[in-house]
Amino acid sequence: MCGIFGVVYSRAADLDPTLSADILRSLYRFSQTRGSEAAGLTVANGRTIDVFRQAGSVDQFLAAPKFEELIARGLALWSANKSGSDQIGLAMTGHTRLVTNGLQSNEDNNQPVVANGTVGVHNGIITNEAEMWGAHPELERRTEVDTEALLKVLRRHFDAKDDLGWAVQQAYREMKGAASIAFLFDKLDDLLLATNTGSLHILADEQGRFLAFASERFILQRLVEELDLRGRFGPMQTRQLPAFRAALVSLRDLSVREFACVAKEGEEAPRVAETRRARAMDVVLHTRSPANLKRCVKCLLPETYPFVEYDDAGICRYCRHWRKIAPKGRRALEEAVEPYRRKDGKPDVIVAFSGGRDSSYGLHYFKSELKMNPVAFTYDWGMVTDLARRNQARICGKLGVEHIVRSADIQKKRRYIRKNIEAWLKKPELGMVTLFTAGDKEFYAHARQLRKETGIKLVVFSTGNMIEDTPYKTGLCGIKEGDHGMTLTGLPIENEMALLWYFARNYLANPRYINESLLDTLNAYWQTFVVKDDFLYLFHYLPWTEEEIVGTIRREYDWEVATDTKSTWRIGDGSAAFYNYVYTTVLGWSEDEVMLSNMIREGHLDRTRALELAKEYSKPRMPSIREYAQLVGFNVEEALTIVNGLPKAY
């Protein structure tokens, strides 16, 4: 379970700033055994309730500049305004998270939870959160974390009757599961502690200057002993807040008013004498999230996108430089394939076939629309998913198309991926994420070889359309691209050299990349950028429209979609869920937003609908991520902890 804890200093306390910061840091370190996947802080300083939360380890959290800033701000305001009539003491609460509901990569799921002027931390699991939301349709759910339901229901009852004791009992009556909580309110000078399990312990001195609480008695005992608090504050007592009890701690004089949070049958809720504030404190959330990013007013690209550069009107350079896609047209396509047609019914075209939406439509188009005789070709490099294989079987089976598969040494390829991921995790560099997919570029070499083996000269790829253009890959390597065409192989020579130099520098900076995958990676570069690209690209000729492509393959072949995302892009690629998690966590956007931005520019979507889809598509695909880690062989929890703890671009 999570760890919740906190410390309150009264207005009468003679506070040593260094000691106060040490006490809080110690509470975090002693509590991290209860959860180390995220951490959060609340500082009620008399003017504001400041909130900061961050995914990652406790050490990463304590090293964050914002943590130091909020502690210093709280101490400064407390010290400067001790005598003010509206001034409270200084209250700081903390949380170390063991993830049970809601991914920690989404900052809204981490604690403290903030809603309606209430800030709370919670230890436990609420087992009927869906029932609680259903009972209160007037409440809007914003996160996946179960704490939000309890916090909003409690605040709803408090606002309705202006009686905190009654509100606490109502909320605990509606809730099932375990909940030990510490809540602060914008218009009260009180800290609410409550538990239905007894997982709250309180430490206080006899003079009413200092009070601390934690999820375990042992944490408070360590705090007293290691920081010699008795020598600092005099005699102190530690006691457990019993199960089914609540305590309202005054932030002025640390007096404690205890009452039942779970009422007995027929027992009336106590009237708790809350301390009202003359002026409500503003709740200030100091954690930036992708939702707060500045974005292009025409597309979705945020300020963290490489070389985005907004003009005075707020329009990004990608929108300003966008040239409308002008496919060559079906007639040009028919003219291009005509020399390769065979009249004897033998295969006359090789169609690269990953099982994804574009290649599935491409195979359909060449067989059903152009009436050619294709051979489908797949290169299985170890990351072709079972979903993609099922879709391949569906389409080839219905069309009666021969399916040629070239399989790599799967275990070796996955070992290469694992070594590069492990190298990357030691020294994360976003431009190097593309190494995770370098192994699939051998597809080009096998296509050329199959052309020789079969004598079929025409090889078709259904990739390379500008809707799915991904210039961020080179942008993250520090390369500012121009209009380079519709395929990765169309990079100008100067950018190819810059890319090579970028990788060389990073290999030297992180020698762990110099492993047995090196030759495979060099081959990927060679096949992509050096060998002549003499393939035909379907969407250089046809307009790309998602409705037509996905609608056709869903309708004609019952093409299968993923269960962990509503996007249909990259769902046949086992690596996409993980690398998009990295981009979303660190940069605040995924490649789906790049595609959606291109769709806006082409008039396929309006911006409002694209924003809705981006929010949906950005949800982490945890089942796919865990499957990827299992196949490749790396520790997913360790990897996610490292990724979550990386400095955020936002």
Image (cartoon, rainbow, N blue to C red):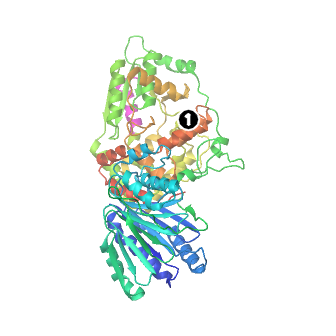
Q: Is 547 in front, or is 380? A: 547
Magenta span dominant secondary structure = helix
- Residue 319 lies within the magenta run: no
Dot 1 lies on which element?
A: helix
The residue that appears at 35% across and 49% down in the rendered structure is 417
Residue 145 in view of the camera: yes
On screen, residue 215 above or below 496? below
Q: Position of residue 125 (x, y in %)?
A: 34, 55
Give the residue number, with chain letter if any, for mark 1.
466
Left or right of residue 176, residue 315 in this image? right
Q: Is 497 in front, or is 556? A: 556
Q: Is 253 in front, or is 123? A: 253
On screen, residue 384 above or below 402? below
On screen, residue 242 above or below 156? below
Residue numbers of the magenta segment: 442-457
Q: Position of residue 645 (x, y in %)?
A: 43, 60
Other residues around mark 1 within 10 Å, as few (<14) / some (14–19) / many (≥20): many
Q: Quadrant of residue 208?
A: bottom left
Left or right of residue 428, residue 495 in this image? right
On screen, residue 122 above or below 357? below
Q: Quadrant of residue 87?
A: bottom right
Q: Position of residue 353 (x, y in %)?
A: 39, 29
Residue 501 in view of the camera: no
Amino acid at the residue labelled 1: Met
